[in-house]
Image: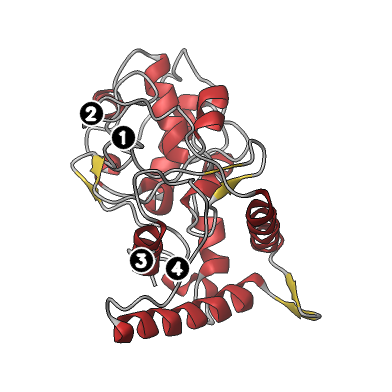
Amino acid sequence: MTHVEPWVIRPAPNSGELLSSYLIRISRAHGRSPGAFYRQFFPNNTCWRMDLDRSASERFLEDLSRFVKIDDRVLEDLTLRSWMENLDTKTGKSAKANVAVTPWINSLGVHKQSTRKHTLSFCPSCLKEENFLRKEWRLSFVTVCATHRNTLIDGCPNCDAPFVYLGQGLAWPSCNQCGHSFLVQEGALDEFIFGNLCDFQHQLLRGLMDDKVVFFGHHLSAQEFFSGIYLVLRAVKLRLRILGNRPCLSLMLGSAYSGRKTPLILAERLRTF
């Protein structure tokens, strides 16, 4: 891209924000939908037809940095690439960094600016207060919000439609199927269960970010640790498949999911392994 004029309205990215969330906020600051806005400045780029949080090219980030006057390394930190290396199940960390599926990162199933799966979880209270999507919400093991002490949701509480954000217009969000607000928190976890989930989730996130995990006295790299859990869950998935429809696992998660059943959510998450 040749010389470009920086955009007049350039909101700063938030700490821990997803790249796609940042791009959506920029377009809304200009009073445009994301698709229309970025087609004007990136006419040959198909970023909204893919999972750009995983697959945004270096060229795209370099061009974007000229418009927002932010170092492209800062923009790359908004993507999932740095985490993908530690979540890779291969010994060569970056060997699979650009494949379509990465363990522990929920696949969006992007198609025509929308998502077809219940994959992006979020805290309604966080979204209402902070107005951006967090990077950690793309991780399959992140299921609770420690700040508001509630569970994340990944679909409409009223009709169970997936949370679609890539094709959203100018307001955060309501269900594109029934119009129900996504910003209303429903249900709560048992305090004991929440405490255990929150502690475990915090340990996983800390290990992912620090690239080191202490597991029963053993010091492991994040890649070694997550690869080990990945293999265990592959075995669990195989066992579930063998058992078929027979009940084999019970999770007491209170009334957090009023519409969708927890085993269904578990089954969707296991499909990523």
The type of residue carrying mark 4 is: Pro
Give x and y (percent) for residue 112.
18, 41
Q: Residue at x 50, y 64 (%)?
A: 251
Can the viewer see residue 90 in this picture? Answer: no
Task: In the rendered structure, find residue 178 and report the number of the disc placed on it.
Answer: 2
Q: Residue at the spot x=38%, y=14% of the render?
A: 30
Q: Are marks 2 and 1 in contact (CB under 8 Å)?
A: yes
Question: Residue at image x 38%, y 63%?
Answer: 263
Nearer to us of marks 2 and 4 is 2
Q: Residue furthest left?
A: 112
Measure how far apart labels 2 and 3 are at the Cα level: 25 Å
Disc 3/disc 1 C-alpha distance (Å) = 21 Å
- Using the image as rendered, state which of residue 92 and residue 138 is in the foreground: 138
Question: Which residue is tagged 1?
Answer: 158
Q: Are the two marked residues, 2 and 3, in contact with CB atoms closer than 8 angstroms? A: no
**Mark 3 highlights which residue?**
267
Task: Tell me the number on the disc at residue 103.
Answer: 4
Q: Residues under labels 4 and 1: Cα distance?
A: 30 Å
Q: Amino acid at mark 2?
A: Cys
Between marks 3 and 4, how big is the CA–CA gap? Answer: 15 Å
Of callouts 3 and 4, the N-terminal one: 4
